[in-house]
Amino acid sequence: MRNLQRLQRASFSFVIVTGMAFATVPIVAWAAETYPNKPVRMIVPFTGGSATDLIARRLAFKMTDSWNQQVVVDNRGGGGGTLGSHIVAKATPDGYTLLVHSIAYAMSAALYSKLPFDPVKDLAGVSQITITTSLLVVAPSLGVKSVKELIALAKQKPGQLNFSTSGVGSGMHLNAEQFRFAAGLDVVHVPYKGVPEQLVDIVTGRIHYVLTPLVPALPFIRDARLLPLAVTTARRVAILPDVPTMAEAALPGYEFQAWFGVFAPTGTPRPVVNQISKEIARIVELPDIKKQFQNQGEEGRSSTPEEFSRFVRTEIEKIRKIVKLAGIRVE
């Protein structure tokens, strides 16, 4: 009798456990099949009109059209991008709150010892969207026409040439420090608040060179007021096909690229994450989107969630090394 009761209890427990296990399968499948069945919030941790915001809006427009659900861009600027990231890190992991961020995500992780969230554990990569280059530019009056000539001039005049950035710890600063170490230069850093002021001061001779975002520099290049020496991506850009890469021009292996991508709260169902990732891959290959990217000196580049997560971790470590070598400190 006791053996029969034990057998009945064991059978009952087995039915409950296996029933629960099998129940999760259709729930997860249902989540993916019905996603999205309500509006999706896409948080941009910067102000409207920023590069990240413009890319997010292109993505949101195409997703809204494809999914027949509104994808709303929500600008939550503050803290160098950490405020918006924190909101998404603490959001319900269901795929309805996403983060569109940039290389600034990895920069924050490398620069700040204390963040309100863990950039590796609390957010998971969904897909990269695009990469964009920087330009090494000088004024024609400086008298150099190549990266090698600029390096030679700087070495002839140690401590006399200067470069500008958008501030300590900015992407421009990290790029310039990588260039300084790669070329072995003794040059002076002059931080500015914005890019336009830097470009004007290069033209007038107050600044000797800058590694600038491409788009603000284009009018100066077209008017022959600035001379582009190299791009910092691994490949040349379509909008300036005659400008060599930094690796081609003087420094083999050199690469520094800004990038943009989508993140989701850790724990978001994998089928949902995969669906979003595949949608991004489709969008970046659309002819009109590719054309828009090219006009901005960008290149569409999607990735799987696993690839993007690995890439972000690698970027964090790369930037940490630059920060340590340059002794960069930010509050």
Image (cartoon, rainbow, N blue to C red):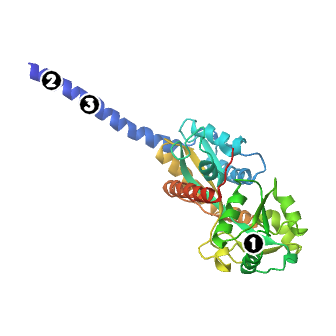
In the image, taking residue 70 as reference, residue 263 lies left or right, namely left
Q: Percent x, y for residue 123?
A: 55, 44
Tell me whether circle 2 and circle 1 mark residues in contact (CB < 8 Å).
Answer: no
Residues at marks 2 and 3, CA–CA distance in whole angstroms? 14 Å
Residues at marks 2 and 1, CA–CA distance in whole angstroms? 86 Å
Whichever of labels 2 and 1 marks the residue nearer the N terminus, that label is: 2
Identify residue for label 2: 6
Q: Quadrant of residue 24?
A: top left
Whichever of labels 1 and 3 marks the residue nearer the N terminus, that label is: 3
* Image disc number at residue 158: 1
For discs 1 and 3, the disc positioned in front in the rendered view: 1
In the image, taking residue 205 as reference, residue 130 lies left or right, namely left
Name the kind of residue labelled 1 in the image: Pro
Q: Is residue 273 visible?
A: yes
Name the kind of residue labelled 2 in the image: Arg
Name the kind of residue labelled 3 in the image: Val
**Residue with the most extreme top position:** 1
* Image disc number at residue 8: none
For discs 2 and 3, the disc positioned in front in the rendered view: 2
- Packing grade of label 2 (10 A; few <14, some 14-19, many >=20) is few
Quadrant showing the C terminus: top right
Front-most of 71 and 149? 149
Quadrant showing the N terminus: top left
* Image disc number at residue 15: 3
Residues at marks 1 and 3, CA–CA distance in whole angstroms? 78 Å
Q: Is residue 42 visible?
A: no
Q: Quadrant of residue 288?
A: bottom right
